[in-house]
Amino acid sequence: MRKNLLTACLLMLSMTTFAQKFTIPVFPDSQSEIDSNMGMFNSQLDWIIQNQKKENIPMVLHVGDIVNFDNLTHWDKASQGFARLDSAHIDYAITLGNHDNEAVQEYNGSAAPGDTHANVRKTSKFNSYFPTYRFRAQRGTYEPGKSDNAYYTFRTGNTYWLVVTLEFCPRPEMVEWANKIVKKYHEHNVIILTHYYLNGKGEIVKNNAGYGDSSPQYIFDNLVKLHPNIKFVISGHVGFSSFKVDEGVNHNKIYQMLQNYQNVEYGGGYLRLMRFDLDKGTVDCELYSPYFKKSKPENTHYKIEGFTTIKPKL
């Protein structure tokens, strides 16, 4: 009896220790891969599935522009790819870019005729191929049956996490909704996932890029800087890689990262690998391509030290 109890205690200790080390893979814009090189996209999926246990992967993120054109061929390719993660029981969260809706024409990359501010909200194909029930970690959405603005939770050891996805340059009511979700989950560490936020110089953008209703600066001023539990903002849309650390009104550090290589080597098959070691207080953020089996240069490799998390009150 005592032996069994000791074994159980040691197993729990081992699991807790392992859970303090984990990796969150982030897909940059995959539009060029879906369009022209599915081998790259599949190499990313292969790496995640093959390293799920070794890297202790609790969640996969995608910064948007999943597809290049809003047509059935591209969405079918993307859906089949993510179905591999479904089969491997790997959770994921996706935010939407300007190519993932009717703002971009079905068979070329230029803006579709009409009001781009309205068209960027027309996401019927995405939501048809990715119905809410596909997202196992999803806990709610702003609009019923639509994952354009949604939130997800996961747990690593005794640390709780919340991922909030926000539409491209979101409508103000979406930002207000996100504020309520972040406040409700005040014991969770928050990752904001939105397509357009940082530029290549590491600056928070002040315009809407011709789409949407607000700006990245609006997101920062009216959401990101206001909550002590917001830890990361992760984005894509523009090239290539940048990193910015800001301080919120509660004196918490906010880590903001850009990754997008759509115009280089058809995307290059890169993943942003966010490797957490909560005991050491570090997050190592490398760009690695399983397709080329190489990492991006050191100036794209961000190393966070002194990282702290919100702990639930027991």
Image (cartoon, grey):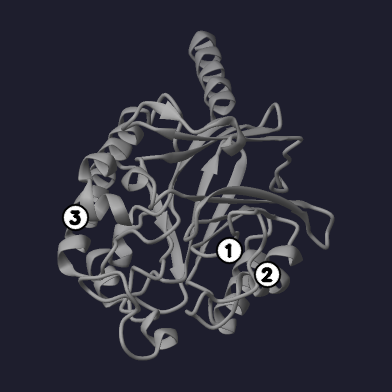
Q: Which residue is mark 2?
A: 223
Marks 2 & 3, CB-CB < 8 Å contact: no
Q: Residue at x 31, y 42 (%)?
A: 89
Real-space CA distance between mark 2 and mark 3, rounded to the nearest whole angstrom = 34 Å
First in sequence: mark 2 vs mark 3:
3
Q: Is residue 72 left or right of residue 286?
A: left
Judged from the image, the secondary structure of the residue bearing numbered disc 1 is loop
Q: Residue at image x 31%, y 87%?
A: 113
The C terminus is located in which quarter?
Answer: top right
Q: Residue at x 54, y 10 (%)?
A: 2
Q: Nearer the viewer, mark 1 or mark 2?
A: 1
Q: Crowding at label 3, few (<14), some or many (≥20) Cα neighbours within 10 Å?
A: some
Where on the picture, by quarter, is residue 31? Answer: bottom left
Number of marks in picture: 3
Viewer-nearest of discs 1 and 3: 1
Q: Secondary structure at mark 2?
A: loop
Mark 1 or 3 closer to N-term?
3
**Viewer-proximal residue among 110 and 128:** 110
* Image location (x, y in percent) of residue 228: 75, 57
Residue 139: quarter of image:
bottom left
- Residue hosting label 3: 77
Q: Amino acid at mark 2?
A: Leu
Q: How crowded is the residue under tag 1: few (<14 C-alpha within 10 Å), some, or many (20+)?
A: many
52 w.r.t. 40: above or below: above
Q: Secondary structure at mark 3?
A: helix
Q: Position of residue 163 (x, y in %)?
A: 53, 56
State the CA–CA distance, disc 1 to disc 2. 13 Å
Please name the residue that numbered disc 1 is placed on.
197
